[in-house]
């Protein structure tokens, strides 16, 4: 659905491999970074283990979701927007954390409902994902951000 830019560098820390992916967003949506994760896992030389991804922010989430039909991403974004509308919506008038804009507290609520970390098995030097599964950062804020996703492979 949305473009993504991610980068990562491998550093060895007492056995496991660790890196951080930076993902630039330009507003609400799902930003796939599966190819960057696959490349990093392959370059690590690790043939098997467990990959943990953790987003280091409180107003976005991580998801494993279908990557074949972009309508799935559109529907998820629209459904979540209806479930948790902006603070400017009359139904959200009870919110008190509004200094950072009408999308901020709803973004925190969305991040509380969705995962901020993922565990993915690694076998034969690759993340074990289904045919139509991709790894996404789900941005909940309206303005552009650079998000950091920590990766740990052991």
Image (tube, rainbow, N blue to C red):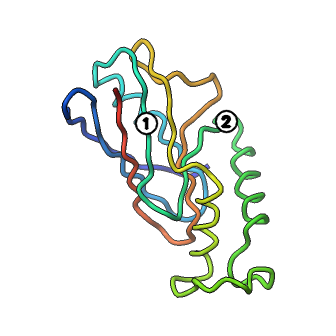
Does 154 appear above or below 22? above
Residue that carries the numbered disc 2 in the rendered image: 66
Q: Position of residue 38 (x, y in %)?
A: 42, 28
Q: Position of residue 77 (x, y in %)?
A: 70, 57
- Work out whether residue 98 or residue 3 is closer to the camera in this orientation and state it: 98
- Work out whether residue 31 or residue 99 is closer to the camera in this orientation and state it: 99
Does 137 appear above or below 124? below
Tell me the distance, in whole angstroms, between the alpha carbons under discs 2 and 1: 19 Å
Going from N to C along the chain, the mark reached first, 2 or 1, is: 1
| Label 2 close to label 1 by CB (< 8 Å) | no
Q: Position of residue 2 (x, y in %)?
A: 57, 52
Residue at image coords 32%, 19%: 46
**Eye-nearest disc, 2 or 1:** 1
Residue at image coords 47%, 41%: 33
- Toward the front, the furthest residue is 14
Q: Position of residue 51 (x, y in %)?
A: 42, 30
Residue that carries the numbered disc 1 in the rendered image: 52
Residue at image coords 79%, 65%: 82
The mark found on residue 136 in the picture is: none
Picture quarter containing residue 148?
Answer: bottom left
Picture quarter containing residue 134?
Answer: top right
Does 149 appear above or below 25? above
Taking 47 as reference, is 133 left or right?
A: right
**Circle 1 sits in a helix, a strand or a loop, which is it?**
strand
Determine crowd level at label 1: few under 14, some 14-19, many 20+ residues with C-alpha closer than 10 A: some
Determine crowd level at label 2: few under 14, some 14-19, many 20+ residues with C-alpha closer than 10 A: some
> Where does the C terminus fall, quadrant-wise?
top left
């Amino acid at each position: 659905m949305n473009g993504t830019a991610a980068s990562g560098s491998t550093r060895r820390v007492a056995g496991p491999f660790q890196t951080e992916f930076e993902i630039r967003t330009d507003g609400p949506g799902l930003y796939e970074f599966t190819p960057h994760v696959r490349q990093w896992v392959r370059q690590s030389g690790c043939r098997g283990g467990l990959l943990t991804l953790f987003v280091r922010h409180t107003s976005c989430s991580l998801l494993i979701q279908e990557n074949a039909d972009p309508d799935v991403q559109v529907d998820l974004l629209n459904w979540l927007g209806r479930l948790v509308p902006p603070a400017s919506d009359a139904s959200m008038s009870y919110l008190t954390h509004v200094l950072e804009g009408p999308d901020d507290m709803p973004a925190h609520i969305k991040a509380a409902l969705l995962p901020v970390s993922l565990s993915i098995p690694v076998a034969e030097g690759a993340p074990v994902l289904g045919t139509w599964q991709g790894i996404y950062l789900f941005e909940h804020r309206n303005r552009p951000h650079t998000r950091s996703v920590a990766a740990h492979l052991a």
